[in-house]
Amino acid sequence: MKKVSFIIFSVFILSASRIQAQGIHIGIKAGVNLGQVNGRSFDDGYKVGFSAGGFAELNFTSKWGIQPEVLFNQTNTTTVNSFNEIIPQGINNQSTKLNYLSIPILLSYKPIPLLSFQLGPQFGILMNSSQTIVGNGKNAFKTGDFAMVGGAQLNVGGFKAGARYAIGLTNINDINDQDSWKNQSVQLYVGLRIF
């Protein structure tokens, strides 16, 4: 993770002069987060949450750039009927909300000005303790999450609309190794470039 951060930081530093020439833009965005936690401990199926935050566009050329973002992402999930058999002292059929501060750093490619394709890593920090699914009050979820994100975005002037898919690469189970839990989400959003 440190290597990835160093590489991203190096790209920012080395391309600062090109970014100045092509432009920096800032904006806000909001939408729905259709998320689930994969693993036999949780119900299958996506549940609706929300997503909101800000983004920056750092354009190297008219086609290539980086779009870093800071987002609040909510994932809703429910434990299965047999959760207490998988996790001792687990509470069956318990709904929980995972609220993440997510920081995607996406490489953006515009084959035409109207359309962008985006791909890159996303770092997530769990903002709530989510102690409600285990009877002993132990934290059930790790505080960090790492995911890969890919999607497409429409660009109409300062207006943005897009869809993306995020797949978690980190096991967020902080109780035991009986089951691997990974976040997965589809995000649909609209945004507005402020300047």
Image: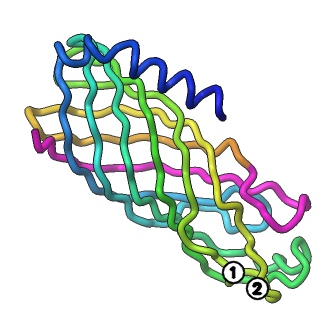
Q: Which mark is residue 33?
A: none
Residue at the extreme bottom of the image, as rendered? 135
Q: Residues within 10 Å of mark 2 (few under 14, many from 20)?
A: few
Q: Which of the pair 19/132 is nearer the observer?
A: 19
User: Amino acid under label 1?
Assistant: Gln
Label 1 element class: loop
Q: Is residue 124 above or below residue 18?
A: below
134 left or right, relative to 111: right
Q: Which residue is mark 2?
A: 137
Q: Residues within 10 Å of mark 1 (few under 14, many from 20)?
A: some
Segment tinted magenta in the rendering: 171-195
Q: Which residue is mark 1?
A: 131
Q: Give me the residue at 74% from left, 74% from top.
A: 139
User: Amino acid under label 2?
Assistant: Gly
Q: Is residue 31 above or below residue 78?
A: above
Asked if marks 1 and 2 touch (Cβ < 8 Å), the reply is yes
